[in-house]
Image: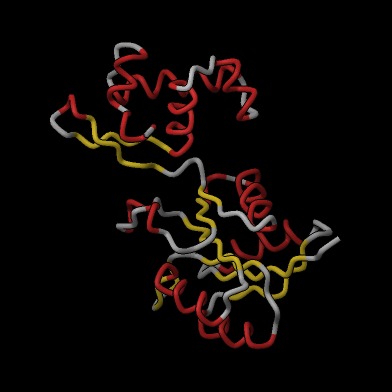
Amino acid sequence: MKIYNIALVDDHLLFAEGIGNMLSGKPEFNISFITSSVTEMFELLKRDSIDILLLDINMPPFNGRALIPRLKTEYPNIKIMILTMYQPMDIGLDIKEFNGDAYVLKISGKQILEEALSHLMNQQSYIDPNIVVPVENADTNKQKVKLTKREIEIVRLIVSGKTTKDIAQELYLSELTIKTHRKNISEKMDSKGLADLIAKTKDLIQ
């Protein structure tokens, strides 16, 4: 079994240590280092061979997002996961332009973090399904409607003809959860039925 060397960099050291303790209990992970200092991070990266780096956005006086190009240049084999409390739109980031390997919200919990790590271990990128994406609603004077990545995923499945039961099985969620998502989507988009929903979300499902 391959062992993945993990490094955690967060200005809240107690949070990073908690994540490190959780991951250290898994045989596939080795916690190489945990630090709250970007300067120390670069010194430790010279010493340790890292597979996955968990990096906060807020790393005073540095910006975690701005560090990604340098990290990708100096350490191209490291998979970089941004682990943050900020939605991309809160920091002026269009998630389609994100140049890291994974973007995960701290509020999303253990399951999402493990999904993200699994994707990185399999050389795949990962975007937290709880990320909010502004969607333009043409019927509300170009008002920006906020749908999460999960809601957008469900919209695509609805439009493809999937039933609530089908969607629940595909996403490994309960039918009640899917029904709640559908209700929230309809309210946000102010849709009057499937045809109306398709019209209002056409830019998402092309």
Residue farthest toward the left in the current orientation of the protein: 141
Question: Which of the 4 image quadrants contains residue 60?
Answer: bottom left
Q: How many marks?
A: 0
- Considering every residue shown, the one lying at the far right of the view is 1
Q: Position of residue 142 (x, y in %)?
A: 16, 34
Which of the pair 124/66 is nearer the observer? 124
User: Looking at the image, which residue sits at the far top?
Assistant: 193
Q: Is residue 5 above or below residue 125?
A: below
Q: Quadrant of the C terminus?
A: top left
**Where is 144 relative to 61, above or below?**
above
Residue 5 in picture, x, y percent from top left: 73, 70
The residue drawn where x is 59% and y is 17% is 175
The quadrant in which the N terminus is found is: bottom right
Residue 69 position within the rendered picture, expressed as x and y whole percent measured from the top left: 44, 74
The residue positioned 56% from the left and 54% from the top of the image is 125
Q: Quadrant of residue 177?
A: top right
Q: How is the image coloured?
A: secondary structure
At x 55% / y 75%, what residue is drawn? 36
Q: Is residue 54 above or below residue 71?
A: above
Is 190 left or right of 3, judged from the image as shown? left
